[in-house]
Image (cartoon, rainbow, N blue to C red):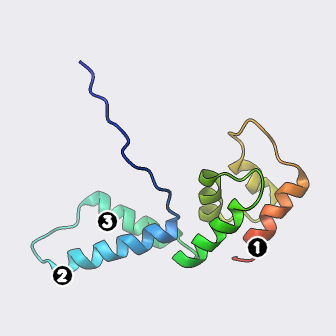
Amino acid sequence: MTIFKEKVQEEFLTTAEAKELLSDVEQERALDEDREMRYELARAIEHVNQFATLEAEESRELVEQLLELDKVDEQTAYKIADILPQDRDELRAVYAQERYTLSGEELDDILNVVAKYV
């Protein structure tokens, strides 16, 4: 017998948005002395504090601007917003699993949008 889990809902978040949500959870847990923070939650909070460079609003704006460009889908836009690639090689690494390659002009368009937020 196999048990399958159904995906009910899926929503992408940038690391900055996750940091904002996890900080609310952290504050909520800090107020309740009887409730310990699980290891996974503590590690997740540590991770977002270390790697979130933009504010949540800035990262959302960046994703929206990236989605306006051709060849940038939703998942890739969030990945770019988290990584903030600085050059073509870093950006090509994001697109390494895709079945298509971007031209130099398309790469530069994406990098110009990212440069506004770095």
Residue appearing at x 50%, y 57% in the figure: 12
Answer with mark 1 or mark 3, whichever residue precedes in sequence: 3
Query: How far is the residue under mark 1 from the one under mark 3?
Result: 32 Å
Label 2: state its secondary structure. Answer: helix
Label 1: state its secondary structure. Answer: helix
Observer-nearest of 74 and 15: 74
Query: How far is the residue under mark 2 from the one under mark 3?
Result: 16 Å
* Image disc number at residue 42: 3
Residue linked to disc 2:
31
* Image disc number at residue 106: none
Residue linked to disc 1:
115
Image position, residue 113 (x, y; %): 76, 69
Residue 41, above or below 116: above
Residue appearing at x 59%, y 59% in the figure: 78
Residue 115, above or below 31: above
Answer with mark 2 or mark 3, whichever residue precedes in sequence: 2
